[in-house]
Amino acid sequence: TDSGEHIGTHDGIAFYTIGQRKGLRIGGNAAFSSTPWYVVDKNVEDNALIVAQGHDHPRLHKRSLSATQLHWIRKTPEQDFKCTAKVRYRQKDVECTIKLSSPNQVIAEFSNSVRAITPGQSVVFYDGEECLGGGIIEHAA
């Protein structure tokens, strides 16, 4: 759990994603409420899946991410800029500022917290309906 308590086993850390609810097989524990469990973090070094109860648990919400393996549709940006971004399928666009930290990495700082940003998945940047490009999420904070 997010408090460090061991409550179960998993099938392999790679099979789970941040924000996942289904397939955790940890419901029905009398020591906890019936509120659903969600994956809130993964500790790959310790092979530990960190879970917490509640769809809007604070550990599911982040204000920024770093992304690499960037691909720009028109041209590579030369300075920081504002746009919107998506980190999950069907998610509403979220306003953000893109900071160019190196030629191969950006930091996206969101105007509001974003739920379930998952390292290894894609982030896509937009200007209205126009797709500007995107990259692979490395880290969220």
Image (tube, helix red, strand yellow):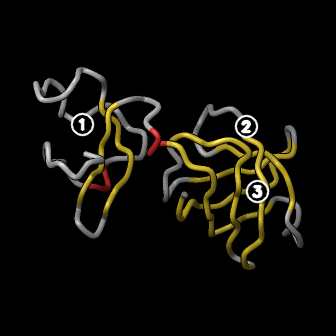
Label 2 vs 3, first from the N-terminus? 2
Please identify the quarter of the rendering in which residue 102 is found.
bottom right
**Numbered badge on residue 81:** none
The residue that appears at 87% across and 39% down in the rendered structure is 128
Looking at the picture, how far across and down is residue 60, in whole percent? 47, 42
Badge 1 crowding class, 10 Å Cα cut-off, few under 14, some 14 to 19, many 20 or more, is some
Q: Which residue shows up at 57% across the image and 60% down it?
A: 137
Q: What's under tag 1, amino acid-wise?
A: Leu
Residue named by callout 1:
24
Please determine whether, in this image, residue 136 is positioned above or below residue 27: below
Q: Are marks 1 and 3 in contact (CB under 8 Å)?
A: no
Can you tell which of label 1 and label 3 is closer to the viewer? 1
Q: Amino acid at mark 3?
A: Gly
Contact check, label 2 and label 3, Cβ < 8 Å: no
Q: Position of residue 111 (x, y in %)?
A: 74, 45
**Residue 123 falls left or right of residue 119:** right
Is the Cβ of the residue at disc 1 closer than 8 Å to that at disc 2? no
> What's the CA distance linking mark 1 and mark 2?
29 Å
Instruction: Please identify the quadrant where the N terminus is shown.
Output: top left
Q: Determine the residue positioned at 30% across, 47% down.
A: 2
- The residue at 32%/32% (across/down) is 53
Rounded to the nearest whole Å, what is the CA distance between mark 2 and mark 3? 14 Å
Q: Which residue is mark 2?
A: 93
Q: Is residue 95 above or below residue 12?
A: above
Q: The disc labelled 2 sits on which kind of residue? A: Asp
Q: Looking at the image, is mark 1 or mark 3 earlier in the sequence?
A: 1
Q: Nearer the viewer, mark 2 or mark 3?
A: 2
Label 1, label 3: how far apart the Cα atoms are: 33 Å
